[in-house]
Image (cartoon, rainbow, N blue to C red):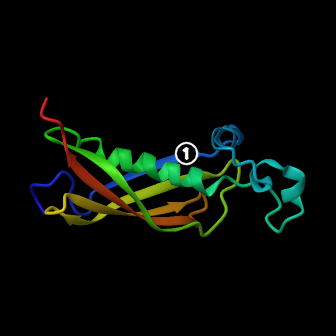
Amino acid sequence: MSGFHVSLGQSARFSKTVSESDVYLFAGITGDLAPNHVNKAYMEKSSYGRLQAHGALIIGYMSAASSMITANAREGDETPVSLGYDRVRLVGPVYFGDTITVDYEIDAIDAERRRATGAIRVTNQDGKLVAVATHILKWVPNSPN
């Protein structure tokens, strides 16, 4: 579809190694101090055997990819905003030291409603799927200042 801010198939990729400090800073900011994220002895007893990143932190990395998709779609008389994430599934753990890659692809455009959706897949350094989601973007009118 032409004449819209993004196009079908447009994609972005964001990669990051998830560090211990990322997880502890996120825990402090959000107040989510669940033992799965900050209690090594507790998690060593689990079948996972080690600490995991927060699912919400992984969604934050999805947001980074969304910002990349809209980076060149910010000019003109509309501003892109997130309407949220649907069908979020955290299908595998992300451990400290894992390098995750977020692949974001525009898979639908509704120009009349000023919306686009993105299919998101997150994999780890071994190519294992760890999360999926659908992201909804909307373009809202700018103020006529």
Name the one closer to the observer, 109 or 129: 109
Residue drawn 58% across and 50% down? Answer: 57
Residue at the outermost left position: 3
- In the rendered view, does 21 fall on the left or right side of 67? right
Residue drawn 76% across and 53% down? Answer: 34
Q: Mark 1 points at which residue?
A: 16
Residue drawn 43% across and 58% down? Answer: 103
Name the one closer to the observer, 114 or 59: 114
Residue drawn 64% across and 67% down? Answer: 92
Decide: is 130 above or below 77. Answer: below
The kind of residue tagged 1 is: Lys
Decide: is 50 above or below 86. Answer: above
User: In what quadrant of the picture does the N terminus appear?
Assistant: bottom left
How far across and how far down the image is residue 26, in percent? 64, 42
How far across and how far down the image is residue 73, in percent? 22, 44
How far across and how far down the image is residue 55, in percent? 61, 57
Decide: is 128 above or below 19. Answer: below
- In the rendered view, does 86 fall on the left or right side of 131? left
Res. 93 image quadrant: bottom right
Label total for image? 1
- In the rendered view, does 69 fall on the left or right side of 100? left
Instruction: Describe the element under mark 1 as helix, strand or loop.
Output: strand
Residue at the outermost top position: 145
